Image (spheres, rainbow, N blue to C red):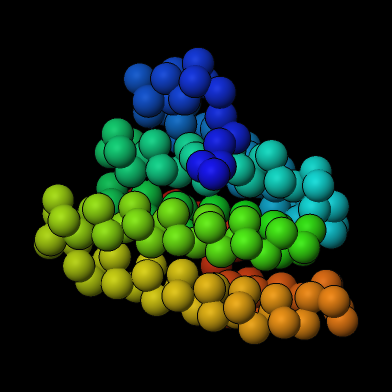
Amino acid sequence: MKLTFLCDSHRGMLSEKSSLAINCWQNGFDTGQLFHDQKLWQEALPHLGCAFESAEIMISTRALDRPNAYELFTYSAVLLADTFMQLKYVERGREICLLTIARFEKELNFFPETQELVKAQLDILYQSIHQLNSLSLKVDKKIDQNLDHCTSLFYSPLKA
């Protein structure tokens, strides 16, 4: 199953106008992170999903320079995966990480010069998958656990 959070109409608008994609990411991520921080997982999910898809659009349309676009995509993926995990949808969280990894592998195929940039993001995503795997074993015992290594990622201002 392919996870989608944006309707075709909005996806098209964001693809056509990169400033809208940036605004959609910022609004979705900020709102989703606020709900996530308050442990309102159900409310966080659609906002973080939109941020995740908007970040992928920003990579495709080159709305931002690659380092920033890659970081925002990774931040969005990790927070979305953690939210799925909190809702006991560990497989969906893993799917988000795997979709993100696949997108970065595509980047490497088309832009081999991005290898170092992509490698840093892949390392974070592989750590997330590892934690999802280990947390899924504990999910019945205590669900209120986060993807610990990623908490420092959440919200850093865009680099100039």
Q: Is residue 75 left or right of residue 159?
A: right
Decide if residue 46 is in sight here. yes
Residue 75 at least partly seen: no
Q: Is residue 36 above or below residue 63?
A: below
Task: Left or right? Give the position of 134 relative to 52.
Answer: right
For this orientation, the residue located farthest to the front is 1
Of 16 and 145, nearer the camera is 145
Question: What x and y, as percent, mark residue 156?
Answer: 53, 60
Examine the image and state in which quarter residue 64 appears.
Answer: top left
Q: Quadrant of the N terminus?
A: top right
> Measured along the vertical axis of the image, is residue 19 above or below residue 1?
above
User: Residue at the spot x=42%, y=20% of the render?
Assistant: 12
Query: Where is residue 116 shown, x and y percent of the image?
Result: 23, 71
Which residue appears at 49% of the width and 62% of the height? 97
Query: Residue at coordinates 60% horizontally, 43% vertically from top-left?
Result: 49
**What is the number of callouts on the image?**
0
Residue occupying the point 56% across, 64% down: 94
Q: Is residue 51 left or right of residue 134?
A: left
Nearer to the camera, 106 or 33: 106
The location of residue 71, given as percent across then percent down, is 42, 59
Residue 150: image location, x then y, percent: 58, 72
Write down the quadrant of residue 39 in the picture. Answer: bottom right
Q: Indicate whether 140 appears above or below 105.
A: below
The quadrant in which residue 86 appears is: bottom right
Horizontal side of 134 relative to 97 (left or right) equals right
